[in-house]
């Protein structure tokens, strides 16, 4: 609770009326009756208090915006009192935790030339040479480095303006600015890592798969290219993207095999060839190009139409950052020579997708 010297709060207009009545009537009691009540002092207009943060105990900037009361009053000082209530008829009790002792006056707009005369934990007085204020001006004063109250809820800043330069006599106005302290609400969210990858004969959006995972070419012929296709789809939020690696071997029967193409090569009937690519081809007419809104791309060795390769451990497709869904179509070709030994030739091809989180 604060105590301070009594203030004279008689306005210029009030003093003129007092003198006039005193001369006419000669009654000293008229002086008392015509003094404005403490709670009825003129108010600052359009009052706004803005805080950069309303969190309890946080350090904040306080910006006071207003217009001076009508009549272009003489202004020499202002007192900013931080109180638990706005009611000027009640004692100003400082809000718990408030600390204005290290505050600085960082902005002045409208009526300027002020410096801090004094300050305590809950009170700041600013001063300047006495000048007439322009009541039409928008006024802004910002104090930085104020520590907010620690009690959640409303508080008030009572602002008094004075003709005197030390906020002790000749008060012009007394007003209040409303402030509030809120509880910090922490909102936490976790985005789990994901890697969505699927392989099938046919894939619809978002890895909806269908079809077989087994192909029977029937009888091979040295005059006909055998072909088929499968698809894989991939998406991830991995920071460094993903890679899809080819695993498996060429077709074999006992110790006989069909040659895997170790470099991109065109299909040639009558040759020993097993290879794949990830493009739409015309010779043979199989496959389709990559689709989807992701950023996945095809490895160069498997990205040329009508050229096929099969090398275990090769990267088929990749993305360098997190990527939305891309659909890749894998085309397989098999050509055999006339002297291929009889037998049942088969293989299992595996696709391994790894996310780089």
Image: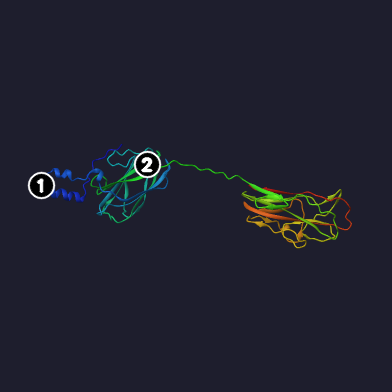
Left or right of 251, for residue 16: left
Work out whether mark 2 precedes mark 1 in sequence or the reverse, and give the earlier one.
Answer: 1
Q: Secondary structure at mark 2?
A: strand
Q: Nearer the viewer, residue 243 or 110?
A: 243
Label pair 2/1, CB-CB below 8 angstroms: no
Residue 19 in the image: x percent, y percent? 14, 49
Q: Nearer the viewer, residue 184 or 344?
A: 344
- Residue placed at 68% from the left, 57% from the top? 290
Q: Residue furthest bottom?
A: 282
- Indicate whether 89 appears above or below 297: above
Specify the quadrant of the image occupied by residue 296. bottom right
Q: Which mark is residue 154?
A: 2
- State the separation of the CA atoms marked 2 and 1: 48 Å
Q: Nearer the viewer, residue 230 or 244?
A: 230
Left or right of 236, for residue 9: left
Q: Nearer the viewer, residue 52 or 257?
A: 257
- Residue placed at 14% from the left, 45% from the top? 30
- Residue placed at 18% from the left, 49% from the top? 15
User: Label 2: few (<14), some or many (≥20) within 10 Å?
Assistant: some
Residue 96 in the image: x percent, y percent? 37, 37
Q: Residue furthest front?
A: 211
Specify the quadrant of the image occupied by residue 282. bottom right
Left or right of 237, for residue 200: right
Residue 61 in the image: x percent, y percent? 40, 47
- Would residue 320 be visible to someone looking at this image? no
Q: How many marks?
A: 2
**Quadrant that contains the N terminus:** top left
Q: Secondary structure at mark 1?
A: helix
Residue linked to disc 1: 25
- Would residue 204 be visible to someone looking at this image? yes
Residue 147 in the image: x percent, y percent? 40, 42
């Amino acid at each position: 609770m604060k105590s301070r010297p009594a203030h004279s709060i008689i306005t210029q207009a009030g003093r003129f009326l007092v003198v006039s009545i005193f001369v006419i009537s000669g009654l000293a009691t008229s002086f008392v009756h015509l003094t404005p009540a403490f709670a009825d002092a003129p108010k600052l207009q359009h009052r706004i208090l803005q805080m950069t943060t309303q969190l309890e105990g946080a350090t904040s900037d306080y910006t006071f915006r207003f217009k001076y009361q009508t009549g272009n009053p003489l202004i020499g000082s202002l007192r900013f009192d931080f109180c638990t209530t706005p009611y000027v008829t009640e004692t100003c009790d400082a809000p718990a935790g408030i600390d204005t002792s290290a505050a600085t006056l960082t902005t002045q707009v409208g009526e300027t030339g002020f410096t801090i005369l004094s300050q305590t934990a809950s009170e700041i007085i600013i001063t300047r040479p006495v000048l007439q204020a322009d009541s039409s001006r928008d006024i802004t004063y910002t104090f930085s480095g104020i520590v907010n109250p620690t009690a959640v809820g409303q508080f008030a800043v009572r602002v008094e303006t004075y003709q005197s330069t030390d906020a002790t006599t000749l008060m012009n106005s007394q007003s209040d600015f409303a402030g509030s302290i809120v509880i910090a609400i922490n909102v936490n969210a976790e985005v789990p890592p994901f890697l969505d990858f699927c392989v099938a004969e046919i894939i619809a959006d978002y890895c909806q798969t269908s079809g077989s995972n087994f192909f029977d070419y029937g009888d091979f012929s040295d005059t006909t290219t055998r072909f088929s296709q499968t698809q894989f789809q991939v998406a991830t939020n991995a920071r460094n993207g993903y890679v899809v690696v080819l695993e498996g071997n060429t077709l074999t029967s006992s110790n006989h095999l069909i040659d895997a193409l170790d470099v991109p090569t065109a299909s040639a009937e009558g040759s020993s060839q097993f290879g794949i690519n990830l493009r739409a081809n015309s010779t043979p007419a199989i496959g389709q190009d990559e689709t989807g809104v992701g950023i996945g791309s095809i490895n160069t060795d498997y990205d040329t139409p009508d050229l096929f390769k099969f090398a275990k451990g090769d990267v088929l497709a990749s993305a360098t950052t997190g990527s939305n869904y891309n659909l890749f179509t894998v085309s397989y070709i098999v050509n055999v020579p006339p002297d291929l030994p009889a037998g049942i030739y088969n293989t299992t091809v595996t696709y391994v997708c790894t996310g780089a989180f």
